[in-house]
Image: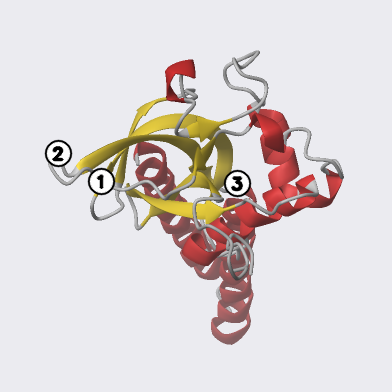
Amino acid sequence: MLGVCPVIPQTPQTNHNFVLLCVPFMQRAVKLHQAEVCRINPEQEFFRVLRYYYASQRGFRSWARLRKVRSIDFVKFEMYKSQLVDIQTSPSIPPETRTQDYTYDPLPAESNPPIGTNLLMHLFEHPDHAECEPVLYKKVPKKLDYRLEACPVKKTAIGWGVSFVEGLNWFTVFIYGCAGFASALVLAVVWSMIRGDIQGGFAIAGFMLAFIGFCMGIARIEIEMT
């Protein structure tokens, strides 16, 4: 199973690494998912893990959703006991003082973010284009040994990981627009044939298109504001 290390008898449970994934939850929230990545070897597998966790929470029927992943960012966040997170800084990677809790290579990092957003997005959409060796994967901050847990006293914990940032899916908007136009055109033709009123049929179709445009505009504003 992707994102879960196989259990090997007599192997200490501390020999685990986790990539902390901040996945959009419902409409406005973000929730933490901790993917076990201690046995990832080919780099393609890492990006398949990213796709798996996003798809399992948000679904990958991108043709039907007005939202899609627009960028993948390295972030610092605060996690609560409910696993909801508050993104604090982007881009951000663990400081050198946290090497007992996180690992990445090279250390210190040569850049922040360690991997550019465009390259991350390309490999997220096309995992087979990633290297066979874990070249970029080494640069990704990974939590060592144990899953991130909220402090019993503060009820929160600070962590570093990867965040999926969603935006408007313009292809879906185009598809919905074409469907609305086709529906209006069919209605206009049918009305004209049955009623013998071409002007009235296309007037109704015009009102339909205006209403569809209004609804799509409201949807765009709502998505871009969240």
- Tag 1's secondary structure? loop
Q: Position of residue 91 (x, y in %)?
A: 49, 23
Residue at the spot of label 3? 170
Query: Can residue 202 be seen in this snapshot?
Result: yes
Q: Nearer the viewer, mark 2 or mark 3?
A: 2
Which disc is residue 150 wearing? 1
Residue 55 or residue 219, whichever sits in front:
55
Q: Could you tell me the amino acid type at mark 2? A: Lys
Q: Could you tell me the amino acid type at mark 3? A: Trp
Which disc is residue 154 wearing? 2
Q: Are marks 2 and 1 in contact (CB under 8 Å)?
A: yes
Q: Nearer the viewer, mark 3 or mark 1?
A: 1
Q: Residue at x 74, y 54 (%)?
A: 45
For the residues labelled 2 and 3, the Cα–Cα distance comes to 42 Å
Query: Can residue 203 be seen in this snapshot?
Result: no
For the residues labelled 2 and 1, the Cα–Cα distance comes to 8 Å
For disc 1, the neighbor class at 10 Å (few under 14, some 14 to 19, many from 20) is some
Q: Position of residue 179 (x, y in %)?
A: 61, 65
Eyeballing the image, is 102 above or below 128? above
For disc 3, the neighbor class at 10 Å (few under 14, some 14 to 19, many from 20) is some
| Mark 2 / mark 3, whichever is N-terminal | 2
